[in-house]
Image (cartoon, coloured by chain):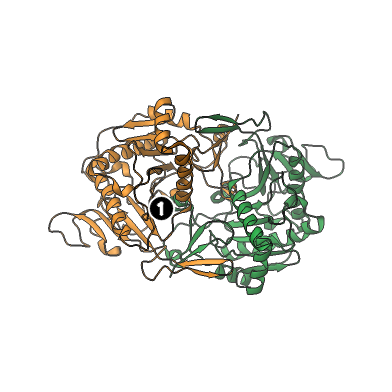
Chain colours: A green, B orange
Amino acid sequence: MPELRKDPIVDRWVIIAKNRAQRPQELDSALHTRAPGPCPFCEGNERATTPEVLAFREPGSAIDAAGWRVRVVPNKFPALTTEGGSEHRGEGLYQSLPGFGAHEVIIESPRHLVSTSELTHDGLCEVIAAYRDRLLALKADRRLVHAMVFKNAGAAAGASIEHVHSQLIALPVTPTAVQEELDAALAFHQQRRCCIFCDLVERERASGERMVLDLPGFVAICPFASRFPFETWIVPTAHQSHFESITHAAICELALALREAIRRIETALNRPAYNYVIHTAPFDTSDLGHYHWHIEVAPRLTKIAGFEWGAGYYINPAPPEEAAAFLRSAEVDFTTPQNVPIKEAR
Amino acid sequence: MPELRKDPIVDRWVIIAKNRAQRPQELDSALHTRAPGPCPFCEGNERATTPEVLAFREPGSAIDAAGWRVRVVPNKFPALTTEGGSEHRGEGLYQSLPGFGAHEVIIESPRHLVSTSELTHDGLCEVIAAYRDRLLALKADRRLVHAMVFKNAGAAAGASIEHVHSQLIALPVTPTAVQEELDAALAFHQQRRCCIFCDLVERERASGERMVLDLPGFVAICPFASRFPFETWIVPTAHQSHFESITHAAICELALALREAIRRIETALNRPAYNYVIHTAPFDTSDLGHYHWHIEVAPRLTKIAGFEWGAGYYINPAPPEEAAAFLRSAEVDFTTPQNVPIKEAR
């Protein structure tokens, strides 16, 4: 029988309906999304992008030229701009703000790789360090309140470019999804005097049935009210509200956990398109006892259709306990990618 | 410059970013979504579905046989079942309910049409009457609190079957998206003593810039904080909280407005995939002064990607004022489809 599950943190119900998985459906899940023409993100094609705002480079290499390992550039088609103020406009019922903010692209490798799992360990550590450095830089602009790092990998996940990359959007307002977590986590903390995410990690470790990974510093779990099949959260085991406070040691641990989680998803599900997002506390708060940053990873195996959009509820055909067991048993190749070209630059 | 707009009803911001429309992107927007084999929804193939719960039939025709005009059947792969109780289960942080509810399919024509715009006027009136009749029937079950009617047309909109149809899901809980509207509308009503939707209709009629249609009984508008390009809401001009209270006369008016809105979207945008949902008040309330049912229509031209999912915010490259002007100017063929087969039954 199907089950309605309430998310333990926010006020959101999910319908776990296993038999729906038998429904004939076209799975639009390819990770590859070739566009015509040369790849603007490959080393050597730096002039195809906007000028870089950050790059980790070989000594002596010139900015906006070859010789980088990770490179951050403003999005060429930004949803927001860093020009103009942030004054509020209101007219009757209608409120608006100028679209002030930052929309940046983190190019994760100079080579034409397509997934996080193909990065070397050092490469992924530098990607995470770039996330942190950009958040710290944007936080210095007092007009910005929050930045969300996200990855779209594969056309079904919304990517228009195949080359391994992620993005961030910094805004003068806190996104709804983060604000709902903040509000619910604060209410829990006021009642129980502990962080709901810390409590969750402890419960999941105790039961084990939704655990995917339990590594030094980080766990990966399929959450109780997973919205998507094989949704996986990566949560630091030590309490920390702001992602940008991550230490160098924790970056190395996160790289191991993130890559293994994605590699398990790719092995078990034949390299699906996927998204991940980092949920972190707003810039205008300091260390919060009630909030705990984390990464939410979702392979894109199902379509968001009328019901999900109209109701704000999700129908998930894969019970998270079964998804976690399947991911735990995936036979993953644990060798770390070496620095050899998987594909040639285009 | 892009603009951040707050929805006038719920607490949701949208980024209106026109230049994003220039971004190279694969538009996955075909309305046709052929599956192999005979179509289970065509007349004559009634045995391919579950037994009907409602049908408008020719006199003398047998149930679950040919001779129907609109037919409602339980979904063959239901997200919910009508067996079992609705007792709440709680275990620590984790709450769940049995997946009690109804998941039905409204087959809108015996012929193999693919869009609402291809139905005859009488045919669409009967589809809307079927929505109403099923809501009234489900409302009689006191365990159910809400039913949402929705349509997925085209694979990009989540449809797995091409034949023109819609669905409904009835639940023992009110969906988040409706609850948020109810809460916000109640707060507005307490402060201003009027319905926010009635106020919106009046403002939009006065300004005209986001109006698509102003017909007897119904308006169609592109909402101020549209989440999707060419998002269009169809709102009754007379206050009414519960869709199932719709009169026969209003059904005829709604059929005209809904078909013309969809036909304008199809003409302007070359027949995209689309969704629509009916937002209506919960079963366990009676006439509410603060809430106003309406239909939200969204062509699926953009993908819901990592940012939208992770933030709960949307990036819309089409300002609603421009979308409305474009839809108003679409040269629509106003002849009503006659009862001739557009495609043969499969």
One can see residue B242 in this view = yes
Q: Residue at x 74, y 56 (%)?
A: A240
- At numbered mark 1, what does the secondary structure look like: helix, strand or loop? loop
Q: Residue at x 47, y 66 (%)?
A: B97
Q: Circle 1 marks a residue in which chain? A: B
Residue identifier under label 1: B159
Q: Nearer the viewer, residue A209 or A198?
A: A198
Q: Is residue A71 above or below residue B83?
A: above
Image quadrant occupied by the C terminus of chain A: top right
One can see residue A153 in this view = no
Residue A139 relative to residue B330: left or right: right
Amino acid under label 1?
Ala
Q: Residue at x 47, y 29 (%)?
A: B321
Q: Residue at x 39, y 70 (%)?
A: B85
Q: Is residue B171 above or below residue B250?
A: below
Image quadrant occupied by the N terminus of chain A: bottom left
**Badge 1: residue crowd in 10 Å (few <14, some 14–19, many ≥20):** many
Q: Is residue B45 above or below residue A206?
A: above
Residue A67 relative to residue A269: left or right: right
In the rendering, at what x and y percent does residue A45 appear?
71, 39
**Residue farthest right in this picture:** A60
In the rendering, at what x and y percent does residue B128 appear?
28, 47
In the rendering, at what x and y percent does residue B78 appear?
39, 63
Q: Nearer the viewer, residue A189 or A51?
A: A189
Residue A269 relative to residue B101: left or right: right
Q: Nearer the viewer, residue B47 or A102?
A: A102
In the rendering, at what x and y percent does residue A345 appear?
69, 46
